Amino acid sequence: MVNFSYRIVVTIIALIISIMVIFSVASITVEHSSSIAGEGHYLEGDMVSQTYTSGHADPVSNYADNSHNLVGIRSGYYNQNYIQATSVKYSVNFTEVGLPHSVTWYINLSNNEKMSSNSTYIETSLANGSYSFFVGSSSSNYAADGGVFSVNGASKILNITFFRVYSVTFTEIGVRLNGTSLGWAWTVNVTGGPQALTFGLDLQFHLPNGTYRYEATSTNRSYYPEQPTGTFTVNGTSVFKNIVFNIVAYKVLFTEIGLPAGTPWLLSFNDTTSNVSGNSVSFVMPNGTYHYGIRTSSNYTSACATGQVTVNGSNLFKNITFSRLVLHKGVNISIILEEIILPVAVIGSIIIFLYIWRKK
């Protein structure tokens, strides 16, 4: 009975072990044949059959230890295809008309691409997108307009028309510094055209035939053009125009306050002394800083008898307030005689007279 029971236990244990071994082998087989669907990821040790488009080498052959790099291979393959798809470029042809055959012309694109040609066309390849361009030529006698264009899945042809231009020279007179060829900065703005600034004597533009309006200014407010605005016409030849700047002066008005009517006063201003009988005096001065001094009769003074004023692009008004002197060295004796000593002397004489009269 014991032996039979022992045999049953051994048989059961052996059966359990057999079942465990069978399930263990089955699970290993499933693990090695599984994949993560839809993501292109494969477990290590898989046998993968992948079809590649023509023109591409089998990426497995480009790696050492292929059994450990299949995920990276597949990912790199699709990344490469994506880059190639987004970097497709299309032909863009710039064709010019109007230039002589010997003149070189240029195209500068907003993607920093710069091209030139002696023929009638310039060709490049660009990806989809928007671009701006600038056009120039080796001759200052010809110009063309730039612009903006878009590439959208197809080739493109852009026509560039060059036109004849003529020099327009503005020359300033009056702003230049003494003994030099330079002056204050001045500008000319051509309506419908360019604007330029210079410290020199000339400003030059290149413009096609037509009538233009201009505006001239100076950065130094002490100078102003005689003709700040005007028009000129380009008609198949160069144009020369002078811009005459004059120094600008502003009114400086001194006004006295506090003097009796008709009282004269002296004003020294900008090395000139004026004898003023009224209550104000004026000067016309350019921008700058100026010193002044004021005098009047001995009975009056002013807290601002001396000082300086600054003219800076506008008229200037300066009030001078006078006040009567209470104690002044020149009038102290007179005041004492008239207002103190004489009354006391009179009163004293009367008292003495009355005293002597009573004695009698």
Image: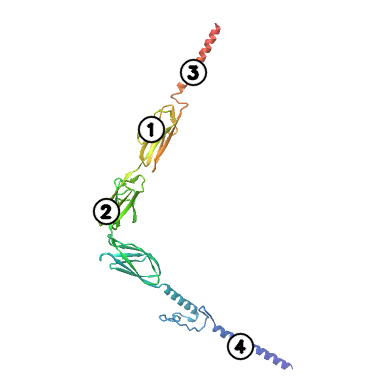
Mark 1: amino acid: Leu
Residue 12 showing in the rendered view: yes
Q: Position of residue 263 (x, y in %)?
A: 40, 28
The numbered mark, 2 or 4, whose residue comes first in the sequence reads 4
Q: Nearer the viewer, mark 3 or mark 2?
A: 2
Which numbered disc, 4 or 3, marks the residue closer to the eye? 3
Work out whether mark 1 precedes mark 2 in sequence or the reverse, and give the earlier one: 2
Tag 3 or tag 4, which sits nearer the N-term?
Answer: 4
Residue 355 as seen in the image, left or right of residue 113:
right
Amino acid, disc 4 = Ile
- Three-letter code, disc 2: Val
Q: Give the mark nearer the N terminus: 3 vs 2.
A: 2
Q: Which residue position is annotated with label 1?
A: 267
In percent of width and height, residue 89 lies at 38, 72
Could you tell me how far apart the alpha carbons at marks 3 and 2 are, in whole angstroms?
A: 89 Å
Asked whether the beta carbons under mark 1 and mark 3 sit within 8 Å of each other, the answer is no
Residue 216 is situated, as x and y percent measured from the top left of the image, at: 33, 50
Per the image, label 4 sits on a secondary structure element best described as helix
Circle 2 Cα neighbour tier, 10 Å, few/some/many (<14 / 14–19 / ≥20): some
Q: Which residue is mark 4?
A: 22
Q: CA distance from mark 1 to mark 3?
A: 38 Å
Count of all numbered marks drawn on residues in the image:
4
Count residues near mark 1 (Cα–Cα under 10 Å), then give few for <14, some for 14-19, many for 20+. some
List the residue tagged with mark 2. 239
What's under tag 3, amino acid-wise? Ile
| Label 1 to label 2: alpha-carbon separation | 51 Å
Quarter of the picture containing the C terminus is top right
SS type, badge 2: strand
For marks 1 and 4, give the one nearer the viewer. Answer: 1
Q: Which mark is residue 341?
A: 3
- Tell me: 208 left or right of 16: left
Task: Give the distance between the C-alpha atoms of the residues marked 4 and 3, in whole angstroms.
Answer: 148 Å
